[in-house]
Image (cartoon, rainbow, N blue to C red):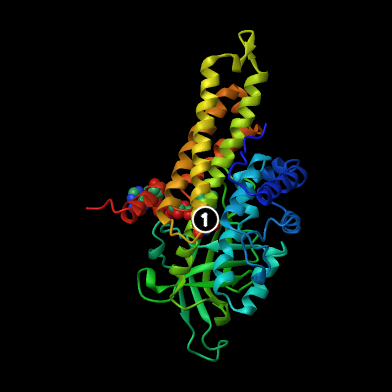
Amino acid sequence: MSTVGTTGLTPEQVALQESTRAFVRREVAPHLQEWEDAGEVPRALHVAAAQAGLLGLGFPEEVGGQGGTLLDSVAMQEAFFDAGGSSGLAAALFTSGIALPHLAAHGTPEQVDAFVRPTLAGEKIGSLAVTEPGGGSDVAGITTRAVRDPSTSSGRRGDFVVNGAKTFITSGVRADFVTTAVRTGAPGHRGISLLVVEKGTPGFTVDRSLAKMGWHCSDTAELSFVDARVPAANLVGEEDGGFAMIAEQFVVERIALAVHAYGVAARSLALTAAYARERETFGKPLAANQVVRHRLVEMHRQVEVARTYTRSVAARHDQGESVIAEACLAKQTAVEACTYVVDQAVQLHGGTGYMHGTEVERHYRDARILGIGGGATEVLTDLSARLLGYTA
Ligand SMILES: Cc1cc2nc3c(=O)[nH]c(=O)nc-3n(C[C@H](O)[C@H](O)[C@H](O)COP(=O)(O)OP(=O)(O)OC[C@H]3O[C@@H](n4cnc5c(N)ncnc54)[C@H](O)[C@@H]3O)c2cc1C
């Protein structure tokens, strides 16, 4: 049973949802458990997703994308989850959504050719590295340092020498390049730059592939930089202008994570509704109990409220409105819905729901990161308080 409503979507968006579902059913669903067990997604999937028009969605055609609005991406992602894609898989397959936007918007033509186009074609994998062992919520506090080399003897003058560490980096084990937030200037948000650090750069290493509660098919890395020499040509946009470029993407990232949350919740609801019709206890189907039916309706209500609000915020963003606070609220609304729904999905599946390999068990584990990553709930609520004027 599909729980994705088409209200408010254009015929093109509905068609996009159909082709996305077909892609997930053909290319993803039969293999997902295998990738969960392997701890990573194969590169061939990136190529297939690019050929299906999914990777380039939301990126301008001038940089190798398919174009499209944020609402188009929302519609595509809803269908991705509806057909059985997981949050972990979306994180691994669409890491380009966080690694590339700064390069697409502010990169040189050479950077676009070297990193953006091949990644949107599925031929390269990129990561975004902001979080450090010392903290992730306080982006303005990062300490990984990049210093311009003044000498000419050790390489090209003006190259950056990078020292520091990053952690929890999605797709960092597989990445061919990492869009890395580094401190080039004074303390605070004005001293941060973005550098593209390529795999194989001497001094740049993937130290560990991290084991996690969920998102098992999404590789997550700890990275270190010891006198890693990065060409000046790999600076993205203006020096010390990194924070603004990162912040520019916050709305899109938070809306994407909201869709992860209600998308996974909608899928868990559909699985649970089907199970409740077929599973019998005390001589009758679970759904014959009023308390169970009402639980399913409550799950439905929370999903649809999150979906409707998130879509409306995405549409307002597409119309050029500033929706920074609203994107935070959409994420929180969807995360709360998801937390409730995946918990109830496991409950109504009984012991089966607790078994490794049962889909609702995976969604339950995968969902836990959504209130932490991309801005922890408390941090986003505090940002909303400031933006909405609820301060002393
Ligand atoms: C699976 C996974 C994938 C990730 N992928 C990436 C990635 O690709 N790139 C990347 O850069 N990062 C990534 N992250 C990091 C993620 O963005 C951070 O974990 C997140 O920003 C929180 O940072 P932290 O873990 O350092 O928690 P901290 O900043 O130490 O905060 C800990 C907790 O304290 C609370 N808190 C924090 N600040 C406040 C406050 N001001 N007021 C009240 N409460 C507060 C919140 O509950 C928060 O969860 C990933 C993390 C995980 C687990």
The residue identified by callout 1 is 253
Q: Quadrant of residue 213?
A: top right
Task: Decide: is 322 above or below 189.
Answer: above
Task: Decide: is 378 above or below 140.
Answer: above
Q: Quadrant of residue 53?
A: bottom right
Residue 260, position in %: x, y? 56, 45
Left or right of 388 in this view: 376: right
The answer to whether residue 345 is seen in the rendering is yes
Q: Amino acid at mark 1?
A: Glu
Left or right of 381 in this view: 74: right
Q: Is mark 1 within 8 Å of ligand 1?
A: no
* Residue ID at (55%, 25%): 296
* Residue ID at (43%, 59%): 322
Residue 44, position in %: x, y? 76, 56
Q: Secondary structure at mark 1?
A: helix
Task: Decide: is 79 above or below 142.
Answer: above
